[in-house]
Amino acid sequence: MNAQTPMESYETLYARLQAVVARLEAGELPLAETLQLYEQGVQLAAECQRLLDAAELRVRQLQVAEPGLDLLP
Amino acid sequence: MHHALSVSELNNYLRELLETNPLLSDVWVEGEISEFKRHAASGHCYFSIKDAEALLRAVMWRSAASRLPALPRPGEAVLVHGYVSIYPQRGDLQLYADMLLPAGMGILHARFEELKARLESEGFFSLERKRPLPARPRRIGIVTGPQSAALHDMLTVLGRRCPLVEVLVAPCLVQGERAPDSIVAALNSLFQAGVDVIIVARGGGALEDLWSFNDEAVARAVFASPVPVITGVGHETDTTIVDLVADLRAPTPSAAAELVVPELPELAAEVASARARLDAAARASLSLRRDQVAEAARVVERHSPLRRVDRERQQADDLVRRLERSVSAAIQLRGVALAGVAGRLQILSPRATLARGYAVVRRADTGQVLTHPAQAAPATPLAITLRDGELRATVENGEG
């Protein structure tokens, strides 16, 4: 239960993307920083999209005391 | 037993015995109403239930009686729920009824109605406690029968709609006597594992098959869930108690699965929109900068050395023009001056002197102007210039 789920990874990346967009939209940045932020944002968006494209449903079965309750092979 | 009990002691002992008996403390009795009386002042109801061979006295307090849609008539077949005890003052054994239903609806339905009424009075179904489903669940718990079609359908929907989520399946028995305990155990294992939302799914079927979902322990476990619970029933069948307790009820397990997760395109759309805003912000920033550069260029140009050369060239042209102007002016001026000088020259000219009667004497042979007599020996030819002409003469005598 400690590893990040893909949804958590996505949300983390998306939150960072939002932060980058917000900073760029606020403007008033030096040109070098603008370009750096833009590149960072493009990369984050691509990573988000990659996560969405590559996601595969993870299914786990919990151990339940009841015998004969095997669900997955 | 070494001493006799008082009547009070015996009745109280009996009361305790009856009230702690598991069967008698929560019992359904089927029979026919006889002599039903409602006490006008207190509102409590006193009645008897009988069958062919036996009769049981019963009392129903005003609070329970007030929930009756209509007072039962003598001879009506009923199902009565309550507990059995004795009234010590009179020694009467009676059923303390809290629910009375027509016998025709069957015991299962009667039990359902009784539990529903009780949980409702405890606030289990209150709309204020219904929680919204999480917008972005990460882990989804599923309680359902193992290898069920419902499970297969839900996993298909989740995999198609939002494969970013993790699914924790807690299998349980859905039928039989052990099913309620099994469902409670499955719920507890999900509470422990930590999920964001729980789907309790069941196939449709006869009321008997749904019995586990009308179980009080299951209802209490769902009520105690730390996260929202959504039920998905196989077919649109009778509502179970668990459906009423849950935060949301979906018409099918697939529908429940669809309700708990956002669709992938929604996420892709929000990424695309963030990407578009990113581009727009960068473009805006660059165009702002382009404007700044253009403005700076204009400033630079204003201070450019070329501009200065141009400017100086123009100044030079101006100077030349001014010079030309002043020179020509000077020349004109000089022309005027020349005229003056000419006038003065005129004044100095010998002609003017001649006009006043003077003459100029030159040697006719050499043209030399004579200013001294020694310059001309006797017989030297002379040319004398007068105002209006010339005279020829010869020197007669020399000096002395």
Image: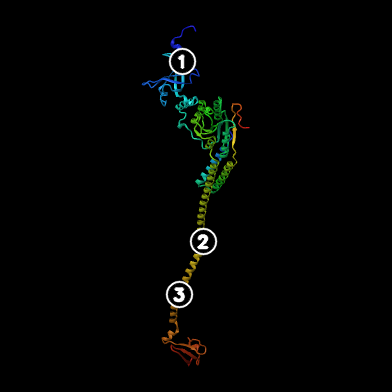
Q: Is residue B160 above or below residue B356?
A: above
Q: On the same chain: label 3 and label 1?
A: yes
Q: Do labels 3 and 1 touch, CB within 8 Å?
A: no
Look at label 3 and name its amino acid.
Gln
Separation (CA) of disc 3 from disc 1: 150 Å
Which of the pair B184/B320 is nearer the observer? B184
Q: Could you tell which of marks 3 and 2 lies nearer the N-terminus? A: 2
Q: Are marks 3 and 2 in contact (CB under 8 Å)?
A: no
**Residue pictured at 44% horizontal, 81% vertical:** B346
Q: Which residue is mark 3?
A: B332
Seen from the viewer's position, the closer of residues B187 and B64 is B64
- Looking at this view, name the residue that lies furthest to the left: B41
Residue B77 seen from this side: yes
Q: CA distance from mark 2 to mark 1?
A: 119 Å
Where does residue A20 sit, x and y in percent of width and height? 53, 44
Say if labels 3 and 2 share a chain. Answer: yes
Q: Which residue is mark 1?
A: B15
**Could you classify mark 3 by the number of other residues whose Cα lies within 10 Å: few (under 14), some (14-19), or many (20 or more)?**
few
Q: Amino acid at mark 2?
A: Arg
Of pointers 2 and 1, the one earlier in the residue sequence: 1
In-image side of B354 versus B197 (left or right): left
Examine the image and state in which quarter residue A3 appears: top right
- Secondary structure state at the residue bearing disc 1: helix
Instruction: Name the residue nearer the viewer: B253 or B267.
Output: B253
Inspect the image, locate mark 1, and give the three-letter code of the amino acid beneath it. Arg
Task: Report helix, strand or loop for mark 3.
Answer: helix
Residue B330 screen position, x and y as percent? 46, 73
**Chain of the residue under label 2:** B
Q: Which residue is mark 2?
A: B308
